[in-house]
Amino acid sequence: MSRIPRLMAGASTAVTRPAVVHRYLAGVEGVRHVPASGPFVLVPNHNSFADHLVLDALLTVFRDAPTFYLTKAESFTHPLRSRWTEGMGGIPVDRDRPGRELLASVDRVFGSGSALVVYPEGTRGPGWPLLPFKDGAFRFADRGGVPVIPVGMWGNQDILPKGAVVPRRAKARVVFGPPLAVDPALPRPRRIAAIAEAAREAVVRLTEAARNPTPDRDREAAQQLAERAEAALETMLSRADQLPAAHRKKQARILLGLARRADPDNLDALVTRARLAGLRAMDAPAPLRPALLRSVRRPAEQALTIDPDHVMARYVLGRWHLMTPRPLGGRTEEGVVHLREAARLGAADTRFPMAYAEALMAGGRDDEAAHVLRGVLDSPAPDLRTADRRRRAAAHYSALAVADGPTSPVRG
């Protein structure tokens, strides 16, 4: 009887392992290569039981679907260890006689859109050099028609060396590579051999990269992490998200923490932190908002000193001025200026002109507001969020027309 149906039913998509990320990760590169959805086979090097912990923590942040691991059948014999292994998404495999049940389990993993982690070395190695690769991972991927993504890790062997049961204070670095390409016209045996060879070369290269970080690669990693954090917030705000807002915010916080570790000066991470703080303030009870809004202004202003044309920094700072009481520094007129620039820089995204129109209304500049609202109304609304925005613009536009009377220019 396969354990996969029970695991599928019980696997949590909540970000439950942030402590592992904060405590044991020195850096993560190649985040753009990890698909946010859909099945794939991940092939890492394997030199520590900490490999499971680190990969599980990261993939839980990067993806919403659970992750599963091929695990030797012996790991399921001891009751306590079996429970832990199942909780980590372990799939039992008899390495000498893999059978149909294993293939059915893998099919269900791919069918659910989940990732499958297979250590092609087959067992924990010494760390360096890598052990020879077995071809099981590549047979699964070829059979399922899913991509193979290589990853190299370094430092896990110091967190949990062979024989250790308590993690040590050490840091790991993880480098994901792009999906591997192979000529689909090759006969299957040659195709599998080719992708296995390409995977080994990639994992060797990525592990070397994990052993030898560089400032340039850290800066690039921070940018990718910041973009992933912003994407988490956009998904939360999309009105089509199936997961709680708290989940997305936690994802974003962890990603931003990793970005800050890689490059404290990354502009997009700085602005997304300010944006996250602003969302937290908007959700808080009114008496608590002023205190929470304090953490919004400074990073947005800092970003604008470096890049005055950063559209999201303009937007965040403009919204801050409109939300913050005047005794605490909020200035409607400054909010109008920042949001006017945001609308100019990001005219194709109706959230920016919409916010500018509302700032103009707050400042009593109704004729100008009506002109900007007209532009929002004339823009397409391809999703729920922009459709809602257009309905709000229509309500504002009608209210302005009624207030100004039948001869008002805002009637269009």
Image (cartoon, rainbow, N blue to C red):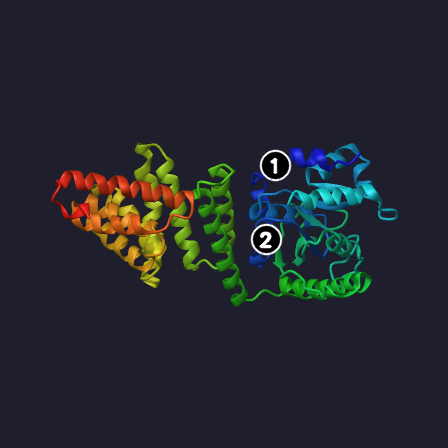
Q: Nearer the viewer, mark 2 or mark 1?
A: 2
Residue at 16% x, 45% y: name it: 364
- Dividing the picture into quadrants, the one containing residue 309 is bottom left
- Give the camera-side residue of 328 and 184: 184
Q: Position of residue 232 (x, y in %)?
A: 48, 47
Q: Position of residue 356 (x, y in %)?
A: 26, 50
- Give the camera-side residue of 232 and 53: 232
Q: Residues within 10 Å of mark 1 (few under 14, many from 20)?
A: some
Say what secondary structure mark 2 lies in: loop
Q: Residues within 10 Å of mark 2 (few under 14, many from 20)?
A: some
Looking at the image, residue 142 sits to the left or right of residue 215; the answer is right
Say what secondary structure mark 1 lies in: loop
**Badge 2 amino acid:** Pro
Mark 2 or mark 1: whose residue is earlier in sequence: 1
Q: Could you tell me if residue 325 is visible in this image?
A: no
State the residue position of label 1. Answer: 12
- Give the camera-side residue of 41 and 264: 41
State the residue position of label 2. Answer: 35
Q: Position of residue 281 (x, y in %)?
A: 36, 39
Looking at the image, residue 268 sits to the left or right of residue 60; the answer is left
Residue at 74% x, 56% y: name it: 142
